[in-house]
Image (tube, rainbow, N blue to C red):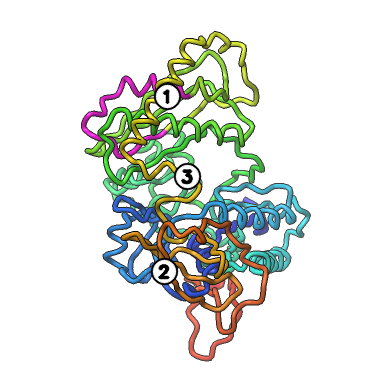
Amino acid sequence: MRPAPTILHLDMDAFFAAAEQAAKPSLRGKPVVVGGVGVRGVVSTASYEARVFGVRSAMPTAQARRLCPNAAYLSPRFTLYRQVSDAVMELLHALSPLVEPLSLDEAFVDLEAGGVPAETAAVRAVGEKLRRDIRSATGLTGSVGLAGAKMLAKIASEAAKPNGLVVIEPGTERELLGPMTVRTLPGVGPATAETLRRAGIHTVAETAEAGEAELVRLLGRAHGAGLYGMALGQDDRPVVAERDAKSISVEDTFEVDLTDRTRVRSEMLRLADRCVQRLRAAGRSGRTVVIKVRNYDFSTLTRSETLRGPTDDPAVIREAAVRLLETVDTTGGVRLLGVGVSGLADFTQEDLFAQLATEREAAEAATAAAVEQAVGEREPHDAEEERPRRWYPGLDVVHDEFGAGWVQGSGVGRVTVRFETPWSAPGRVRTFAVEDPALRPGEPLPLVGGAPADGQSSEPAILPKFLSPEPGDTGSVGEEISSR
């Protein structure tokens, strides 16, 4: 444990939903849900306004709609989220060479490695400046936790949400952790929590009181000993600058179960191509191809094949994926397909695959042509790919006359668009035919690039958990947990 709170944990507040609110002035201060918008969709992120109604991440979208029917339900725009994430990570790297990203919106930072004095006042000042810089660069807010260990820094940032800063002073860890549920500790999932519950252990304090020997008996030596140390507030895990990916994969869930074998195969080929694109974008290759098939009854099967060497050849990965698919019975209907590559390397061994026969390539090309013809016969209107046949809610669009906007909804051959920009006032709504030649997909606009509209704010609707101000209270945000 460090003698000063020099490990920082940043967690952006309701990241996807907040980015959408910042981009769409008409949604600020209103419930927004980002995720799958279809009947089988799942909530990725809910704004704080939507969380008031009980909407949570990983909840089926259908359930979220019942809880909060008046929310805006939007499809994710990962291009925008990655742009914002890159800007935030750049600010973090300016603080220290040791930055450990956990996701697009979350990271640890070792401030000591960046030369910040090991003093509470100094690290607090860095944390407050970071929050201001993030707001200035992106228009969004983030919560910051500062502590002497990674586990505690993450707990502190969770307590600071939304838009706050919390410092845990070294020496106060056990007092802070004691009353918290055991699920607070890293590595305690539902199965471990149930094992502890059956032993009468529910809180962190009870975990520490049980002793290391009892935890080892219940959970095994490695897990039990590690959990005991964390229950005492001990966590010596370093901030690791590079986290090497173990696999790269893609998957799709279909709104209607796929029962046609030819369609299942064509979707598997498409996913294999997407997986190769991600593989090449990461500058990697892999030697093990894995497919995932979820059937109509939610049973999930995986199949894998290890090649003779690492590759990023799309023909090889497509062939392996289809070969694996042939071992799975899909006649009952498929609701999800996935393709992944593991055993990653930084090089390829193309010479090992030079024996791909010309006849096989010709046969594959002929099969692909037949698939395209069959799909074209069933879905003649899907031939034009330049303009999507479905305008998903939240999609960026541009109209020749009205400029930039976003899709509010579509159906019955019509699409409704609200024309506004991140720095404009809430815009007007207009409706067009889905085939209107003046309407086309657009690119995300920068969240910061113009004067904000009068009276508009993307401030969170709920104050941080650790803050309960009285009327007229003007106290500063960021009191230390240890002083509570």
| 278, above or below 142, in the image | above
Q: Residue furthest right?
A: 115
174 relative position to 92: left or right: left
Residue 321: mark in rendering:
1
Q: What is the secondary structure assignment of the residue under circle 2?
A: strand
Coordinates of residue 466 in the picture (x, y in percent):
50, 72
C-alpha separation, residue under disc 2 versus residue under disc 3: 22 Å
Q: Earlier in the sequence, mark 1 or mark 3?
A: 1
Q: Residue furthest front?
A: 437
How many marks are shown on the rendered structure? 3
Q: Earlier in the sequence, mark 2 or mark 1?
A: 1
Q: Compare residues 78 and 239 and report the one nearer the observer.
A: 78
Res 461 visible: no
Q: Compare residues 427 and 447 and report the one nearer the observer.
A: 427
> What's the magenta region?
318-338
Q: Amino acid at mark 1?
A: Ala
Q: What is the secondary structure assignment of the residue under circle 1?
A: helix
Q: Residue at x 61, y 73 (%)?
A: 423
Front: mark 1 or 3: 3
Q: Amino acid at mark 2?
A: Thr
Question: Residue beneath label 2, please?
Answer: 431
Coordinates of residue 180 in the picture (x, y in percent):
41, 60
Question: Residue beneath label 3, please?
Answer: 385
Q: Compare residues 101 and 175 and report the one nearer the observer.
A: 101
Q: Earlier in the sequence, mark 2 or mark 3?
A: 3
Q: Amino acid at mark 3?
A: Glu
Q: What is the secondary structure assignment of the residue under circle 3?
A: loop
Residue 272: mark in rendering:
none
* Magenta span contains residue 325: yes
